Amino acid sequence: MPLKLSDIKKYSIKIAEKGEVLAWIGPCSVKKMDLKIIPLDGRKYECAGTVYLANGLDLQASFRIKKSDEPLLIDESTYTKIDDVWYKLGEPEFFIKTELEKEDVFPIEWEPDVPLADFGKGPFKMDWKG
């Protein structure tokens, strides 16, 4: 389901805007962090960045990551921003809005705005196939 700013506020959905890193401090709450490097300390983070689609298109994104589990990136929670609306990668509305087919999108690479400890800035391959 596409998310407008009003939906994000109304339902307290955790989305990281450009340059932000949000640290999960409870099951439903996050704290904005001013980090130069995201520590991979077992905590779950929501971080802003970019996704690079197979067709060369790059989109602002919000990723959920957690080092203590594999994989590092929790793919199904990746949102992309198009015209001030957030879309989950792979949702039908994403394909309608972008007028892309799956083969235009996958494989995807992702890059956080703030580098990851032990991994750097990226880009990294996203294993998720939608």
Image (spheres, rainbow, N blue to C red):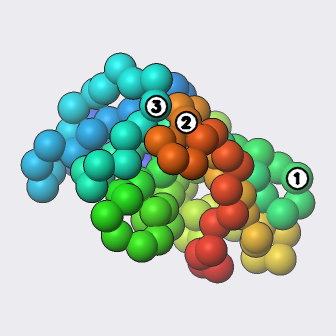
Give SS at disc 3: loop
Residue at horizontal 22 percent and vertical 45 percent from the top:
24
**Residue 54: image location, x then y, percent:** 84, 63
108 vs 75, left or right, is right
Image quadrant in which you'd find residue 130: bottom right
Above or below: residue 118 compared with residue 65: above
Is the residue under label 2 in contact with that under label 3 (CB below 8 Å)? Answer: yes
- Identify residue type, mark 1: Gly
Residue at horizontal 50 percent and vertical 67 percent from the top:
75
Residue at horizontal 67 percent and vertical 46 percent from the top:
122
Q: How many marks?
A: 3
Give SS at disc 2: loop
Mark 1–mark 3 Cα distance, whole angstroms, equals: 27 Å
Dot placed on the residue nearer the N-terminal end, 2 or 1: 1
- Identify residue type, mark 2: Pro
Q: Which of 101 and 35 is in front in this view?
A: 35
Give SS at disc 1: loop
Q: Pointer 1: what residue?
A: 56
Image quadrant in which you'd find residue 23: top left
Image quadrant in which you'd find residue 64: bottom left
Whether residue 18 is visible here, answered yes or no, is yes
Q: Pointer 3: what residue?
A: 37
Residue at horizontal 50 percent and vertical 42 percent from the top:
116
Q: Pointer 2: what residue?
A: 115
- Identify residue type, mark 3: Ile
Dot placed on the residue nearer the N-terminal end, 3 or 2: 3
**Residue 93: image location, x then y, percent:** 59, 65
Dot placed on the residue nearer the N-terminal end, 1 or 3: 3
